Each structure stands twice: as structure tokens, then as C-alpha cells.
């Protein structure tokens, strides 16, 4: 574990101190709880600890507007020490933020305090078996019924499913309208008709299939306006995409620190490994990509917080570059370490498994390039 690698970006001294405090908390409290959890299951003791120490509360400020820079700082700092804690926090935010942003007061009052305390597990349910990157093609139906809505259909690759206590679910309310016919709903994970099964994926957190079989929800469970659910989803994703990049930067920093330490200690060919040009140049490239990714991430976060007109482009750039850079850095660290890095339980073996998925979820790298290209002509 390392406490090095503070973000070299225009953050306040207070923010820098907070990053160090988060890493220390992660090392002393959260990482042991993460290690005690079972892969594929929601780690409720870990969530409760993050609630008790106020980390989850920072995702839901009293103003109702989460700052993207705060989110990125949290995710990067946690990812350097305990990726399981980072992911658990991020999923609480992803599932809970649409409720804060677009929910009725009674729905916010019911769920947000419990999510922020780590007592209720949240999930964001958008993707379907035949609607991944093309979210406008989703087919889960929401039909008027008994003063509310009845939801029927399936979601796939949903983090925290089927164990979540509350889901933000996107369903079709107007046929043939594409993205303009989708509405967002809050669904109680223990309601009649909610089911699903876990999926065995290369992922330390639970992920699965969510099935809604005629699940009834009241009108108060609608998030935002009817047929405007895609706007709810995009508003959430525009905020969280740079922070996926921050997660990637945290992993890259952890891998870089490990590689620098190993290359400085390992004897090979009559000297330290770092004295080999092939190794030193690879380390230099890894460090440069990590810092470039960090700068893109925090610039995109600043753009979101200050309402710049090119937020969507910058968010896409940050996620694209940071996740691709992290893949390169982690792979390079594994190569420098050799076979020992692939032993079960080694930090780099863990990061090697963790680093792949962010290039796919919340918009694959190819989708980010499409967004960037489209925004260039807007």
C-alpha cells in the first residue's frame, strides 16, 4: 500500500489533505473489510463503514448538487488503496444520484438517507440483453395500471443485481419513440415481482440479471418527467464518466508505484532493473500517461462543476483516455514484475482483473470516440 501519488492538479490544499485522509482510512479500515468480503456478494459491512465515516454522505450533499471534482478525488484516492471500496462507493452514487436529482421529496426522504448511511444498496439499471451501447433501443415496458405503473422486462450486466435494495430503472413508456419514449423509475428491490440471478463475471462486486415481472410502482416513483428518462440517465452519466477516469487513474497510480518500487529494488544483469533502458523508458511512458489522464479527468470534472458548454466532449475524453491509459500502465507493471505479478493475491494480479471492465461500462471506448467526434461538429 502506498500513500504517494497525490494529484498534481490545481486542487486546494484542503482537497489534497482530504485525499491523503481517504487513502489512510482506506488502508486502515476499508481494505481489511474488503478482503473479508466474498467476491460476487454485496459487502454490506464495507458499505456501513463508509457510511459511518462519512464517505457516502459526500455523494449526497445538502445542496443536492454533487461536485464532480469531489467525486473524482474520492474515487481516485480509494482506488489507489482499495478498489472494492471505490467500486462500492461509486455504485451507491450511480444508483442514488438520479433519485436526488429527479425524485419526488417523499422518495428522496425514503431512500437517500439509507443509501448515504450504507444501509440500503443502490443500483443503476439501464442496460438490457439487446440494448447495451444503444440505450435508446431498450424494451422493458412500463404500462399504466391501478394509479401507477407496471414494469415488465429484463436488465442485464447490472452492478449490485440482484442484491440491491433499490434500483433506478429505465423503461419504455412510449413505443416507437426511441430515446424520447423512456421514463426513469425508482423500484424497491424487495417488491413483488422483482427477481434475477447473479452472473459470474471477472469482477469483484456483484453483477447480474434483473427481472421485473409486472412490478407495480406508484406515480411518485417516476424520476423527472414522463418520456424524459434518457435525460435523467445522461445527466447522471455525464457526471460519473470523468469519475470512471478517476478510478482508472487511481489504479494506474497504484500499479506505477508498485513498478517503480520493484524496478528500484530488483537485481538483474548486474544492476538494478531500473537501470535497463527498456524498463526505465517503459516507466517514463507509464508515468506520463498516468499524469496526462489525471489532468484530463480533473479538467472534465471542473468543466462539469462550472457548466462549461463542452462538458460531454470532455467527459468522454477523460473516460476514454484514462481507462485506456490505465490498461497500458497496469499491463506494463505486470511485465516489469514478471510471473510473480500473476500470482493470486498479488496487487497487480488484482488490478489486472479490475482494469479491463471500465473500458466497457458506462459507455465503451468506441462509444466515447463517437461522442467526441459528434461533439466536434456541434
Image: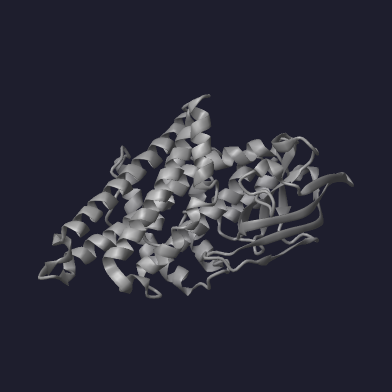
* Residue 191 position by quadrant: bottom right
Q: In terms of depth relative to the viewer, which is nearer, 298 or 155?
A: 155
Up/down of 305 relative to 262, above or below = above
The residue lying furthest to the left in this view is 270
The residue lying furthest to the right in this view is 146
Q: Is residue 22 visible?
A: no
What x and y, as percent, mark residue 280? 19, 56
Q: In terms of depth relative to the viewer, which is nearer, 125 or 138?
A: 138
- Image side of residue 328 versus residue 235, left or right: left
* Residue 255 position by quadrant: bottom left
- Residue displayed at 54% across by 51% down: 361
- Residue displayed at 29% across by 57% down: 256
What x and y, as percent, mark residue 50? 48, 59
Quadrant where the N terminus sits is bottom left
Up/down of 18 relative to 231, above or below = below
The residue lying furthest to the top in this view is 378
What x and y, as percent, mark residue 27? 36, 64
Amino acid at each position: 500500500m502506498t500513500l504517494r501519488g497525490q494529484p498534481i492538479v490545481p486542487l486546494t490544499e484542503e482537497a489534497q489533505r482530504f485525499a491523503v485522509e481517504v487513502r489512510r482510512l482506506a488502508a486502515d479500515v476499508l481494505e481489511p473489510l474488503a478482503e473479508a468480503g466474498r467476491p460476487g456478494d454485496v459487502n454490506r459491512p464495507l458499505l456501513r463503514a463508509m457510511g459511518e465515516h462519512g464517505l457516502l454522505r459526500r455523494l449526497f450533499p445538502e445542496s443536492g448538487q454533487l461536485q464532480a471534482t469531489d467525486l473524482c478525488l474520492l474515487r481516485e484516492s480509494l482506488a489507489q488503496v482499495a478498489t472494492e471500496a471505490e467500486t462500492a462507493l461509486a455504485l451507491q452514487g450511480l444508483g442514488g444520484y438520479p433519485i436526488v436529482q429527479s425524485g419526488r421529496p417523499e422518495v428522496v426522504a425514503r431512500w437517500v438517507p439509507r443509501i448515504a448511511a450504507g444501509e440500503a444498496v443502490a443500483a443503476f439499471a439501464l442496460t438490457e440483453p439487446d440494448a447495451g451501447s444503444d440505450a435508446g433501443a431498450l424494451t422493458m415496458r412500463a404500462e399504466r395500471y391501478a394509479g401507477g405503473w407496471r414494469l415488465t422486462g429484463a436488465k442485464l450486466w447490472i452492478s449490485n443485481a440482484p442484491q440491491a435494495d433499490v434500483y433506478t430503472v429505465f423503461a419504455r413508456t412510449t413505443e416507437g419513440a426511441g430515446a424520447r419514449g423512456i421514463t426513469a423509475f425508482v423500484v424497491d428491490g424487495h417488491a413483488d415481482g422483482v427477481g434475477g440471478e447473479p452472473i459470474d463475471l471477472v469482477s469483484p462486486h456483484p453483477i447480474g440479471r434483473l427481472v421485473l415481472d409486472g412490478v407495480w410502482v406508484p406515480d411518485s416513483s417516476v424520476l423527472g418527467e414522463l418520456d424524459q428518462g434518457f435525460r435523467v440517465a445522461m445527466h447522471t452519466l455525464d457526471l460519473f464518466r470523468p469519475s470512471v477516469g478517476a478510478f482508472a487513474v487511481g489504479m494506474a497510480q497504484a500499479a506505477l508505484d508498485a513498478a517503480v518500487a520493484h524496478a528500484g529494488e530488483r537485481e538483474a544483469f548486474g544492476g538494478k532493473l531500473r537501470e535497463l533502458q527498456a524498463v526505465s523508458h517503459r516507466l517514463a511512458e507509464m508515468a506520463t500517461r498516468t499524469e496526462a489522464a489525471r489532468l484530463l479527468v480533473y479538467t472534465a470534472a471542473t468543466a462539469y462543476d462550472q457548466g462549461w458548454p463542452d462538458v460531454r466532449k470532455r467527459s468522454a475524453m477523460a473516460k476514454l483516455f484514462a481507462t485506456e491509459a490505465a490498461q497500458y500502465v497496469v499491463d506494463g507493471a505486470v511485465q516489469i514484475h514478471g510471473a510473480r505479478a500473476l500470482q493470486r493475491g498479488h496487487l497487480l494480479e488484482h488490478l489486472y482483473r479490475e482494469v479491463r471492465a471500465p473500458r466497457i461500462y458506462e459507455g465503451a471506448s468506441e462509444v466515447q470516440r463517437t461522442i467526441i467526434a459528434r461533439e466536434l461538429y456541434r
